[in-house]
Image: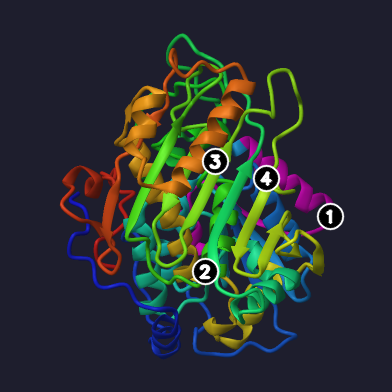
Amino acid sequence: MQPPSKTQPMMNRRTFLKQSLLAAASLAAVSGCKTAAPRPRARILGANETIRVAVVGFGGRGQDHIKGFRALPNVRVTALCDADREILEREVRRFRDRGESVEAYTDIRKLLESAPVDVVSIATPNHWHSLAAIWSVQAGKDVYVEKPGSHNVFEGHQLVEAARKYGAIVQVGTQCRSSAGLREAVAWIQAGNLGRILRVRGLCYKRRDSIGRTQGPQPIPASVDYDLWLGPAPFKPLRRARLHYDWHWFWDTGNGDLGNQGVHQMDIARWILGYQELSPAVLAIGGRLGYVDDAETPNTLIVFHDYKPAPLLFEVRGLPEKAGSNRMDDYRGASIGVVVDCEGGSVVIPSYTRAIVYDRAGKQMRVFDGGGNHYANFIEAVRNRRPELLHSDALEGHLSASLCHTANISYRLGRTGSPDAIRDAIRNLPEVREMLGRMEEHLAANRVNLQQTPVVLGRLLRMNPRRKTFRGDREANALLTREYRPPFVVPKRV
């Protein structure tokens, strides 16, 4: 498949929501399957009508989907789907032990053919997110899809197009958007209460130990349909000790911690800045450092998105504060969070719900705090057929995930270099020099010798933000999409 060089210009949020509301509630066949008749999308559901939910993938994050939807009034989980029969059967037993009936599937296509559900909630590995969501939308379902909403830029754009075309309610699981505290804080910052924003920095300092080394292809668990589990990804032997979860650290199935934990903080950072298109230039520097294992994605990374006038910076650290420690570094009080620098002070967001405001002297001025329910926000939009009620619709999720994807592309196309060579290459980028200096101190504290194990200097990539393609770089554009494995193909036309 060629990269989407002729992708339509990116729609803005207002256009997307308007067209979603006006879109016809038409249906499309899913891989030639006959779909179960859904409720008409145009009909507003009463508060007492039951919304039926299917949860797809629940070996990890999907458990929270089940819990979250079961806790809402007049919402029932009526179907489950997982390519691992052991996980599937264990969850079915839990439902039956509670006296709840539920249908079970290993193949999402079978679920969409026959299960009488209104909503599909997707918590599969990343490589399945967009395709499962697009198929579900085409089958007449509304969708809650876990972050990141896509595995690459192209398929995220296709999900936005599908949501618009079929009038679907699609929420992406960047649940910080539903935090009352953060919503108030973002509005306060954007109102100019601290003056002009100078920069926003996202932080993902989260301990990630080595996944170890294997000596060849590993056996597939007998309970897993490996063909279904891989879906759109290439059919390759398993080259890690653990099938589940460690898929995050391989490019075929995951996006590293930048696209795993980090996408939450990337989303908050872009939300604060208010940018509704991809950055005009991106650069990433880092590596998988401090140990040698089977994984491919970096555990240490700095990212520069060259937005004007205020850049978006990002840092990933998987190693502790120093060798032998169990603690993680922090930057101005945040380890997994966001720091906003403004003319009149700064805002530190150290959690999913809390934002602390400081004046220029570092004195605390005020605190915003308060949670929210992302599932309830989604269900409200579903009941009212109003996508503008969503806190993180398909377009918002697509843009934030794509900032992770483009940074990863910069890294993947980079080359290792000596510390001096890398410093020389970024001599005209003061924000990057500052991040690099602190990253080098962090690695030295973990006894990483950068002469012996040099970091990767990513390729500086310049983008046409509206077309969402890189300027004059075929190699980079090829990584905006992937070769899909039939029949698990994200369509060029949804």
Is 320 placed above or below 363 here?
A: above
Q: Which residues are magenta?
A: 86-114
Main secondary structure found in the magenta portion: helix
**Which quadrant would residue 45 be assigned to in this image?**
bottom right
What amino acid is at disc 2?
A: Leu
Q: Which colour assignment does the render follow?
A: rainbow
Residue neighbourhood size for the residue with mark 3, other residues' Cα within 10 Å, grouped as few (<14), some (14–19), many (≥20): many
Judge the density around disc 2: few (<14), some (14-19), many (≥20) Cα neighbours within 10 Å.
many
Q: Earlier in the sequence, mark 3 or mark 2?
A: 3
Name the element at disc 1.
loop
Residue at the spot x=17%, y=47% of the render? 474
Residue 126 % position (x, y)? 48, 47
- For disc 3, the marked residue is 257
- Chain-order first, disc 2 or disc 4: 2
| Mark 4 to mark 1 CA distance (whole Å) | 45 Å
277 vs 63: above or below: below
